[in-house]
Image (cartoon, rainbow, N blue to C red):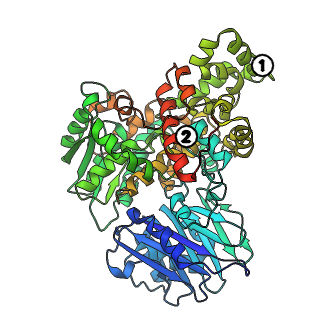
Amino acid sequence: MCGINGIFAYHTAANPPREAELLATREAMRARGPDGAGVWWNGDRRCGFGHRRLSIIDLSERATQPMASADERYVVVFNGEIYNYPALRAELETQGAQFRTASDTEALLHLYRRDGAEMVHRLRGMYAFAIWDNEKRGLFLARDPYGIKPLYTANDGWTFRFASQVKALLTGSQISRDPEPAGLVGFHLFGHLPEPFTLYREIRALPSGHFQWVDETGPREPQRFTNLAAILAEGAMHPVAPSELAERLRQTALDSVRAHLLADVEVGVFLSAGIDSGALLGLMRDAGQERIRAITLGFDEFAGTAEDEVPLASEVARHYGAEHIVRRVGAREFREDLPAILEAMDQPSIDGVNTWFVSKAAKEVGLKVALSGLGGDELLAGYPSFCDIPRWRRRYGAFASVPFLGRAARTLMQMLMPDFARAQPKALGMLEYAGSWAGAYLLRRGLYLPDELPALLGEDVTREGLRRLSPLRTIEAQLDPNPASQTGRVCVLESSNYMRNQLLRDSDWAGMAHGLEIRVPLVDWRLTSFLAPDIPSLAPGAGKAALACAPSLALPAVVRRRAKTGFSVPTGGWGALPHQSHAAAKPKLRFKGQASRLWLLEVYGATAPSRTGQPMLSH
């Protein structure tokens, strides 16, 4: 796990890259790799790599990066972990490859030499990497199927740059800070920035599950090598009996956990009172890990309520014989840490505070790796959205299919019942949006609706941002090919949006800010592919019930019966941020989503101006 960056002056008329820029970009990611640093230049210094290292596999100096092949034709910088590395190494060695290290990084060099771009189909893990080919004088970049690891790029027509963080690229001082309207609109719609957009026009994310080639002609368009909708569509053609789910999940979940324990350092676990993290703890024990340290956050504000994770988490830890570490967090620590949280955020997000504090707790006890139960709800239909979205489409779809009916009804209600319209903005949007899967998903996960944005961002920014982002068309395209079931469609939507753009991104910045690698065994392409035939027939609650029984010693019944709650932090009772952006909009908010909207506005107001040097908002 690391921070990577690079510069490639591909145009013959481009100035050679400056070492000061390469090093400044690298050092902006020091927290990601506190164990060491490296730099490399090709012969004519037209391409350079930087690397900050967090040592997890092969802790020796021989595994430092950037790493070159024995003949120095290929050089790699890599962020992530390849969990099937031992099998890949054995296969490559039988074909003559000679390894000089025990690191998974070196496997990428040998695999690329053999397979070229097709290597990505052999990788199981989380990864973002770049490989320089000295013979072809080109750069190959790739990012894992779910986008667990970030990779941002910038191209000015002369020079191509990449890094693990947006802020790191900006630190190099060679990239424009012009705002990206699609990023501004996307954040206000969803509370995160939909990839490939960032807050800046010149910086894009390499999309999840894509690779890209850059040579003297410039960057080629990123090429997709995975498609979740296609995996689920294929699985739906080979359905299995619901009665087989428990055993199939037991086998493949244990396989994933075992793979994710690959490390030369101790692996801990984040433990809540929910099924996902509890099942991981039990599976860690089944996989043979003897000492397990489990970390739970506790808040005095939640004591005695359903949101208090500590009592049940303690019972689960005892159940599996784990060492339980409870970390208490209060309002004072939150306010003291808030500037560092916002600084680490890289791009604004309405989530991640919980992961910040549990990662902080893990670092305090000396852990460098921890498993997280993230992904269980998306894969196993654990969210209310798996029921809500299909129900809304059935109930309101016929009305929404009538042209202009929904917009006319919303306008009329805003005129006749303005208080209700302000209190129930999504209710007004049902007739307009619920006719499509994309529209229903926007209603379920959106914080603001498109017609509310001009009051926040101004007419011009909103119009241009919606044009560039095209949210409904983009979301709908994720369902191609048709996943062939209602559960499959929602699985794709939640995995491709909320999980990818918010939960995984938050886990990356919040964990890496503390030099902690967060691994997610339930976000695993092999696991998803194996379970794809089971997803169409998943009944509400069936998937999570099967996961609870996946360990050889099932989770306690009290955990299995517990109603689902979010992994939340009582920030609402800890006071607002010092910034007061959009103050005029706040008195109008009187509905269930008010707290999330307020937090979005405060986070944005506190982060965006400091990153651009000027306010982006229309006041």
Task: Give the labeled residue for mark 2.
Answer: 494
In this view, the residue farthest toward the top is 416
Crowd class of label 2 (few under 14; some 14 to 19; many from 20; radius 10 Å):
many
Task: Give the vertical position of 371 relative to 332 (above or below).
Answer: below
Task: Give the vertical position of 270 relative to 539 (above or below).
Answer: below
**What is the spatial separation of the Cα atoms under label 1 and label 2, in whole angstroms?**
28 Å
Q: Is residue 95 left or right of residue 519?
A: right
Task: Give the vertical position of 304 relative to 129 (above or below).
Answer: above
- Tell me residue 544's x, y (percent): 41, 36
Q: Quadrant of residue 262?
A: bottom left
Q: Quadrant of the C terminus?
A: top right
Residue drawn at point x = 59 percent, y = 85 percent: 45
For the residue labelled by badge 1, is the local secondary structure a helix, a strand or a loop? helix
Crowd class of label 1 (few under 14; some 14 to 19; many from 20; radius 10 Å):
some
Nearer mark to the viewer, of 1 and 2: 1
- Tell me residue 249's x, y (percent): 42, 45
Q: Nearer the viewer, residue 164 or 145?
A: 164
Residue drawn at point x = 40 percent, y = 41 percent: 246
Amino acid found under the numbered disc labelled 1: Leu
Residue drawn at point x = 24 percent, y = 35 percent: 310
In this view, the residue farthest toward the right is 403
- First in sequence: mark 1 vs mark 2: 1
For the residue labelled by badge 2, is the local secondary structure a helix, a strand or a loop? helix
Amino acid found under the numbered disc labelled 2: Glu
Q: Quadrant of the N terminus?
A: bottom left
Task: Give the labeled residue for mark 1.
Answer: 405
